[in-house]
Every structure is written in structure tokens, then in C-alpha cells.
Amino acid sequence: MNTTIEQRRIGVPGAASSLLDSRVEHTTVGQINVDNAVFKCREVNVYYGDKRALRNVSIDVGRQQVLAMIGPSGCGKSTFLRCLNRMNDTIPGARVTGAIELDGRDIHDRAQDPVELRVRVGMVFQKPNPFAKSIYDNVAYGPRIHGIVRGRAELDEIVHTSLQLAGLWDEVKDRLHKPGTGLSGGQQQRLCIARTIAVKPRVILMDEPCSALDPIATARIEDLIDQLRQDYAIVIVTHSMQQAARVSQRTAYFHMGELIEVGDTDRMFTNPGHKLTEDYITGRFG
Amino acid sequence: MLEGHIAKAYDGALSALHMRVLEMGGLALDQVRESVHAYTQWNPVSAQRVVERERMVNDYDSILDTEQLALIARRNPVASDLRIIIAIAKTAAELERIGDEATKIARNVLTADLRPAPPTCRDVAQLARLAMNQLRQGLEAFDRLEATLAAQVIHDDRLVDAEYAAALQRLRLRAVEPPLRIGAALDAAFVLKSLERIGDHARNLARHIQAIGPRDAWLAALSAKA
């Protein structure tokens, strides 16, 4: 039987904690839907034991678009990001309810292999985390273990293309077999991005990818994000509102586990629709 | 709307900018009042004072430019803060032009040979009352960042326009009689035009205030603050 995403929500949102939690819930301001959605998420809740970390979040992620997620610490933006490639599955006691579809397919479907999902939904972390291997092997690792390539020539080609897309090729082409850990912080982060795109994902998730980098390295990553969005959907969590304003086409504001507002970045930063968004982005949030 | 930032220095910088525009507005209003007095009383001393003070109005404009640029560079304002700063910049530009119009009126007294006839003075005084009232209310709306009063100023601009058209018509009828006074009549027409423009700048100022925010959200924010 064909069901819609609205019908496929898992469980009853908030039922577990509704007796303990009398907080007034906000209705998300703005358009949660987009044309050409890669991800469709509806009424997503995340519980860490008894604690409800995410409350009824519904939002689409569009193709060839950067979605920036902003909000104060503990607002749920990183928790939501980790829902998109089922990273929360790895946390003991974590429970996710609601529906999340990637290209029309439920990512919580029993037939869905989480490892295969994480190939299609790559992730770049706050701190660059290259493997203790050569630059070449860092990029080649994914294609090798997932059996994406048939021979050495094809692997060479993927390493070359990925490093070029990540804007790193010219800087490392003469030292491909030197350790990735020997690169600068900004170069290491671009190496991690090259490693992510080497397996040809549909979506790239970025969790504060520039917070450990200097302004020049940050500018390079932001420029790279802008180029990558031609081919990938990108979701970025950032504490820098200026960065969200610079790199994204859509912005989502989270507050205490709720998605308060989502909309075009231009509008969000000039004329936000919710007072909580306004207070946060203008620095009035106390 | 200017307060409540976590960084109190940001509140202070925005309020200082707001206050400086109000000071500039007070000076511009006084320039208009004095220039009209100089013209209707044919008082060269007053006229000279207006011309000399024009530099002060322009100085306010330059200082505001510098302070706004610094605030934008240092604070990266967004949302209502950004809209307020843009409104402040545009308001300062309107006030600077109002200062120019006042100087134009005053210069007549210093350069023309013939003083205006009493009926012309009455028309000028009447139009000036309306234009200054508009400016005064526009500045009050700016002081309180009050959208409702700003809407009233925009609405009342038609009163200034109507009075200008009527005064010009009366001037045209009077100007045909003694040919020697044609120069004075032309000067009077320009003075009336300057006053009508001052009314337009007050209306524009009110529009800049309205552009700060969607009215509903704005009023809600105001009542929440109260």
C-alpha cells in the first residue's frame, strides 16, 4: 500500500513526555516545503532517554541548495543534522520518531542499511579528522571499502577529481603519499570534504566545519561550499550567523528543540517572521 | 527597538545614532523656521544666520555617515537593527535636503531687490506652518519610531500639496498686475516650491520610518516593550 510521508510518521509525537512537559509549542514560521526536495522530514522527535531533544521538526532539504541551521547551543540543530544520516542510532538511549525520506525512501526502513545511507549522506565534522594515512588513501578509502571502483586507474581518477573539487589538488598533487595529518587545519578540512565527495553522496552534512579554522581557511571552505552546491544538497550547522548569511540559500532557526522559523536566507536576515528569530540574530537573546 | 542587545555597547551606539539624527532634525526645523521668518519679515540678519548654519546641517550628515559605516562594519547589523540603520541614513539625507531648501529661501533675502508683497508673505507663512507641522510630526514619529504617526504624516502631505497649488494660483493672479514685481513673484514661486519640497521630504522621512518593519510585528514589539 502506498502511503504518504504524513501517514508514515512513527509513533505519536511527544506522547512519551507530554505529561511531564507542559511547554507551549511553537508553530514553525515559513515554508517548510521546497520544490525538488532531497530530504523530506516530518514531525521528527529525538529523545535521549527521557529528555526530548527535538520536538516535531518538519522541513525539506532542497537540491542544489545550502540549508543553514542556526540557533543557540543545545537548541537541537546538531541533533537534527545527525538524524539525517542516522548518526543518532549510534548513541545509547537515543530514540527518533517521525518520518525522514531521502529521495522518497524512508531512511528508517528496515531494508535501509545505515552504512549505505551514510555513503549517500556524507558528513564533515567540526574538527578535521583525516585518517592517519596518506592524502591519497584518505580520499581513496571510501571508494575502496564501498566497492565503488574497479581498478587503480578509476581510483586515481576519483582521487584526482575529488581533490580538485575540494580545491586541494594543486596544493597536494606532489605529495599525495604524504600523511594527511601533515596538512594545515584548513587543508585537512578540505581533505575531509574531498573524502566525503569521493563516494558521490547525494547530500553533504556539515557540523560547524569552520569553527576550528582561521578566516582565510574559512573563506576557502565557504567558497568551496558555494561551488559544491551545484552538485550536492548541503546542510550546514553553524554558530556564525554571518557564515549562515554568506553561504546558504535557506536558513532554519532552532530554539529549545523546536524549528521556530525557516525561509529564504535573504528574508531571514532582513525581515524575520518570528520574534525569537529576530531576537537571536540581532543579539538580543538572553 | 533600539535596546535589549546582549552587548550593551550596541544599544548605546544605536541610540547615539538615533539621538544625533533627532538633533539634526531639530536644527533643520529651526533652519526652516528662521528662513521663513527672514523671508516674510525681510530680515537679512536672520537670512545670514541660516546661510551660515547650513554648514552645521551638512556636518551632521557627514558625521552620521561615518558613524553608520563604523556601526555596520563593527556590528554586522541584521533584521530590525539593519532596517533601522538604513532608515536613519535615509532620514539624515532628507534632513540635509530640508536644510538646503531652507538656505535657498534665506538666500532670496540676501540677493533679491524687492521684498515680497504682504499677501505673498501671508501665503508663504501659511504654507510654512503646514510644512513645518509635517516636519515636526515626522521627527516625532522618528523619535518614537511610531508607525501610526508616520502614516498620518504621509496622509497629510496632500494638505501641503493643496495649499501649495492654491498659493501658486493666487500668486499667478497677483503677478499679472505691476510688471515691475515679476522678479519678486518668481522668487516667491521658488520659495513656495521650496516649502512644498520640505513637506515632501517630511513625507519621505515618514516612509523611511514605516519601512523599518511590518506594521503588525512592529506594533506588537512596541506594545511588548511597553
Image (spheres, coloured by chain):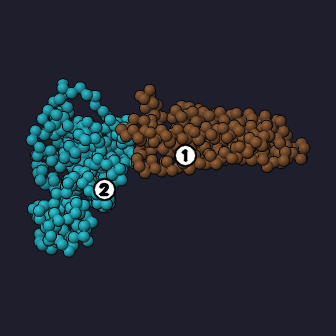
Chain colours: A cyan, B brown
Q: Horizontally, is A49 left or right of A4 in the view? A: left
Query: Which residue corresponds to the image point at 19% horizontal and 45% vertical from the top-left?
Result: A83
Q: Which quarter shows the C terminus of chain A?
A: top left
Compare residues B23 and B202 and report the one nearer the observer. B23
Instruction: Sort mark 2 into few (<14), some (14-19) or many (20+) by Cα contacts within 10 Å.
Output: many
Instruction: For residue A261, say whether it is visible.
Output: yes
Compare residues B99 and A57 and report the one nearer the observer. B99
Residue A112: horizontal and vertical position, in percent?
A: 12, 49
Q: Are marks 2 and 1 on the same chain?
A: no
Residue receiving disc 2? A64
Mark 1 lies on a secondary structure that is helix
**For discs 2 and 1, the disc positioned in front in the rendered view:** 1
Instruction: Sort mark 1 into few (<14), some (14-19) or many (20+) by Cα contacts within 10 Å.
Output: some
Tell me, yes or no, whether the two marked residues, 2 and 1, touch with CB atoms within 8 Å: no
Residue B178: horizontal and vertical position, in percent?
A: 90, 44
**In the displayed structure, would residue A168 be above or below residue B101?**
below
Query: Which residue corresponds to the image point at 13% horizontal and 54% vertical from the top-left?
Result: A116
Residue B18: horizontal and vertical position, in percent?
A: 51, 39
Query: Which residue corresponds to the image point at 63% horizontal and 41% vertical from the top-left?
Result: B28
How many numbered circles does the render carry? 2
Residue B144: horizontal and vertical position, in percent?
A: 52, 32
Q: Which quarter shows the N terminus of chain A?
A: top left
Query: Which disc is residue A99 wearing?
Result: none
Compare residues A228 and B99 and report the one nearer the observer. B99
The amino acid sitting under disc 2 is Gln
Query: Which disc is residue B90 wearing?
Result: 1
The amino acid sitting under disc 1 is Lys
Chain identity of mark 2: A
